[in-house]
Image: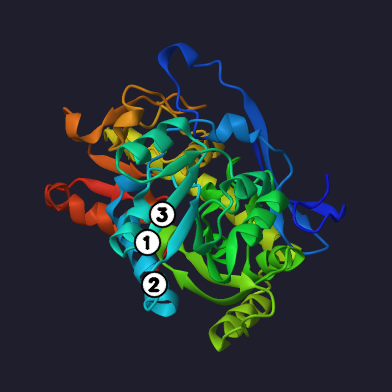
Amino acid sequence: MICRVCDSTDLVPALDLGMHPWCNHFLRTEEVGHEPFYPLRVVHCQGCGTAQLNFTVPKETMFGDHTYLSGITRSLGEHFGGVAREVDQKFFAQTPVKSVLDIGSNDGTQLKHFQALGYDVLGVESSTTTARIANEAGVPTLHAFFNLDTARKIGRKFHVINAAGVFFHLEELHSVTDGIREALRDDGVFVVQFLYMKRIVENGAFDQIYHEHLLYYNLNTIEVLLARHGLAMFDAYLAPIHGGSIVGWVTHRGRCEPTERLRAMRQAEVDARSNELSTYREFAERVRQMKEWNIEYLGRAKREGKVVFGLGAPAKGNTLLNYFGVGTQYLTYLVERNELRRGLFSPGMHIPIVIERELAEVPDLYYVLAWNFKKEILARNKALLDRGVEFFFPVDPKD
């Protein structure tokens, strides 16, 4: 293969998680045992340093329709609200008529916050179900994959373009980036929000590696991509959402000088060897050790007779469950709040999903797959904690 960012052919293995099902393919009863499996392997580009998957599940399979909803989690909604207010205050507070385009807009959660600030909004969403939900909620949403052709068909330029949790998904990476440049006003700001690979490594959060996430960016590597398309990041910060995500401000190249904050973050990557192959090889060994520790922990819980449920059925949880080999021999159910997943089974491990508010029993132990919402989960379940129910976080960032 060639590098998805720089077209180099010098890519070397960094982390091999084996064969996995597509993690967002939650199964109906008749599909259990018939789901396809694909290689899940990270390679490292020796040209630009980008970590990336060496196999692509077609975007039509992964994003044509799915059950993920942004609006389910309060923490994510609060984060999106903060981003919208910050963008408006920093750049467009005095602009009387202003517009925003959201790429991969899901159920419209981010755009609702921009609507509240007076923006003319448009979402582009490839998933049939979520696009319908957004339109029904009063958020204008185009059901399509965003790329350069889509941008030209829209035929408008926007003050703000937002891409939250989508820029690392892109099979048509270069066409999408060209489309962003095409649709961004000369004085516009592209807000790119992405999982920060430096933090994934620091957290041991290997479960954030799955087929939807084709690329794993640090600042250095995403800036290589942006420069190739006439764009440049001029500021960024690390937000706590999802265990550590970058919120970056991008505009047309040559319009803004990089801030001291961005310069310092770039240097921190150099100091931490964040873009070097040796760092990814060390990470792979830590992941192997995590598997041993978790199997030992769950095995001990079962020997002690504890009833164990999984808490949450996030897509990333399926990377963890399948790599660890954790199925119904350890977890009776996965307990979810998203009602689109009622009665489904996890891909690969085939653990039945039950809806939290319909739960008839309480376990002794929750094995928390949605670890990135730890504070919200613990606050919401204080009564269970007071009763002695244990909550175990297999991935547990300390800050």
- How far apart are labels 3 and 2 at the CA level? 13 Å
User: Which residue is located at x 44 percent, y 61 percent?
Assistant: 99
Q: In which quarter of the image is the C terminus?
A: bottom left
Residue 332 visible, this orientation? no
**Which amino acid does the dot numbered 1 rest on?**
Tyr
Residue type, mark 3 in image: Val
Tag 2 residue: 88
> Is residue 110 visible in the rendered structure shown here?
yes
Q: Which residue is drawn at 56% across and 34% down?
A: 62
Image coordinates of residue 221 in percent, x first then y, are 69, 65
Quarter of image, res 100: bottom left
Question: Residues at badges 2 and 1 in contact (C-beta under 8 Å)?
Answer: yes
Q: Mark 1 points at which residue?
A: 119
- Residue 60 is marked as none
Secondary structure at badge 3 equals strand
Name the residue rendered at 55%, 55% in the picture.
156
Q: Position of residue 136 (x, y in %)?
A: 31, 36
Q: Are marks 1 and 3 in contact (CB under 8 Å)?
A: yes
Q: Quadrant of the N terminus?
A: top right
Neighbourhood count class around disc 1 (C-alpha, 10 Å): few under 14, some 14–19, many 20 upward: many
Q: Mark 3 points at which residue?
A: 121
**Residue 205 image offset from top left, x and y in percent:** 51, 55
- In the rendered view, does 370 fall on the left or right side of 385? right
The reply to whether callout 3 and callout 2 are in contact (CB within 8 Å) is no
Q: Distance between the residues labelled 2 and 1?
A: 9 Å
Q: Is residue 266 above or below residue 151?
A: below
N-terminal label among 2 and 1: 2
Q: Disc 2 marks which amino acid?
A: Asp
Cα–Cα gap, marks 1 and 3: 6 Å
**Is residue 117 shown above or below 93?**
above
Residue 33 or residue 216, whichever sits in front:
216
